[in-house]
Amino acid sequence: MTLRDQFGDIDIYLFDQLLRGRIQPGIRVLDAGCGRGRNVVYLLRIGCDVHAVDHDPAAVAAVRVLAASLAPQLPESNFLVEAVEEMSVPDASMDVVVSSAVLHFARDDRHFDAMVHRMWRALAPGGLLFCRLAASTGIEGRVTALGHGRFLLPDGSERYLVSEPRLVALTRDLGAQLVDPIKSTIVQDMRCMATWVVRAPR
């Protein structure tokens, strides 16, 4: 079995959480905005109770096929076509919530906050929220404001961007604890991706 077979095309910073022992077999994990399941391959393999939502029916169908192959004990009802901000997952039901390259598609501040707060509500006491999202850190002078928190990036894409102070303030407002320092990765002056990992109070 190749590493790709074992881990899929997992986000390298989510892989780091695995290495740190923060995601263990058997726990309840929600991938909020799962796409076609790049981040759930290993979680399915190790017996996590994986749940996933995405607004794209084709993406959810692909994840259901993946789950049927790797974890046939999981019901199809774990994988739903839903917007992140309108997820039907029960409050306080997940040990880990993953949001990888999702939040920067927010339409505006209100939409961003709605997604974050819905994911936060899904966390059980002591649960972990892992987010990778586009940020303005280090490229402030290279982006063009379009209004409502959205920006035109040097790579030509339009994204909702957060700043490091915004994430620090959001951590405080949620009553969360930063598990790791906020990490910002600048990709050749074209875009920046931030990794924000926080834990809910017990």
Image: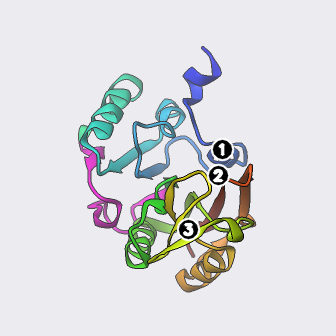
Q: Residue 8, position in %: x, y? A: 54, 29
Tell me the number on the disc at residue 18: 1
Quarter of image, res 62: top left
Against 14, residue 5 (above or below) is above
Against 55, residue 47 (above or below) is above
Q: Residues within 10 Å of mark 1 (few under 14, many from 20)?
A: some
Tell me which label, 3 or 1, sits earlier in the chain: 1
The residue labelled by disc 3 is 161
Q: Residue 149, position in %: x, y? A: 49, 75
- State left or right for residue 105 relative to residue 140: left
Tell me the element at label 1: helix
Type of amino acid at the residue the image marks with label 3: Leu
Quarter of image, res 130: bottom right
Type of amino acid at the residue the image marks with label 2: Arg
Q: Residue 110, position in %: x, y? A: 38, 78
The span picked out in magenta is 77-96
Frontmost residue, 199 versus 183: 183
Type of amino acid at the residue the image marks with label 1: Leu
User: Does the magenta-highlighted stretch encompass residue 95?
Assistant: yes
User: Does the magenta-highlighted stretch encompass residue 83?
Assistant: yes
Residue at figure coordinates x 38%, y 68% from the top left? 107
Tell me the element at label 3: loop
Residue at figure coordinates x 68%, y 74% from the top left? 164
The colour scheme used here is: rainbow
The residue labelled by disc 2 is 22
Spatial CA span between label 1 and label 2: 6 Å
| CB atoms of marks 1 and 2 within 8 Å | yes
Frontmost residue, 183 versus 87: 183
Spatial CA span between label 3 and label 1: 26 Å
